Amino acid sequence: MNARVKNRNSIEYKIKNYIENHENGKITINKCLNDLFGIRIICKDQIDFSQINHLVKEKYDKLKCIDSSKIEYKATHIYFKQSNFEFQWELQLWNEDDEINNIRSHEKYKQDYVRWEKENKG
């Protein structure tokens, strides 16, 4: 398991990206910054989205459970939020077999942010 708080430069990039590429900034800040704090758990036993989603809906119906799998990235994200007056935090569940590909995918995705950071933070 690991945890992190999103760094300032990443927050700035995400806000800039949402303003420029997502309905001219009309999306709420909570949606833009849906992962200021996150925890990732790597599961040794194989689990799939339908299993997790069923458990979440059955036991914790106010939580949002999303199949966040895209191309080589395979994960389930669960979002925790008590009210609209606070930011939610994100729990990522990965299968151990997907860890290497997920890390590679994450590094590839972050290249846009890294490039922006170098260009704008000099």
Image (cartoon, rainbow, N blue to C red):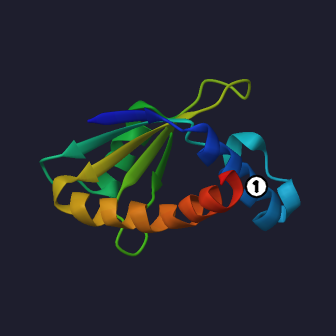
Q: Is residue 41 left or right of residue 87?
A: left
Q: Quadrant of the N terminus?
A: top left
Q: In this view, does 91 lie to the left or right of 32?
A: left
Q: In this view, does 34 lie to the left or right of 58?
A: right
Residue at image x 34%, y 56%?
A: 49
Residue 1 visible to the viewer = yes
- Disc 1 is placed on an element classified as helix
Residue at image x 58%, y 59%?
A: 113
Farthest residue toward the front? 122
Task: Give coordinates of residue 110: x percent, y percent.
Answer: 50, 61
Q: Quadrant of the C terminus?
A: bottom right
Task: Give coordinates of residue 35: x percent, y percent.
Answer: 55, 41
Residue 63 visible to the viewer = no
Task: Give coordinates of residue 28: x percent, y percent.
Answer: 79, 45
**In this orientation, which residue lies closer to the viewer: 67 or 122?**
122
Farthest residue toward the bottom? 71
Task: Give coordinates of residue 30: x percent, y percent.
Answer: 70, 40
Farthest residue toward the left? 45
Q: Which residue is label 1 attached to?
A: 16
The amino acid type found where label 1 is placed reads Lys
Q: In this view, does 23 lie above or below 89?
A: below
Q: Report crowding for label 1: few under 14, some 14 to 19, many 20 or more residues within 10 A (C-alpha).
A: some
**In this orientation, which residue lies closer to the viewer: 29 or 57?**
29
Q: In this view, does 121 lie above or below 114?
A: above
Residue at image x 37%, y 33%?
A: 3
Instruction: Kindly indicate the quadrant of the structure image that contains residue 56.
Output: top left
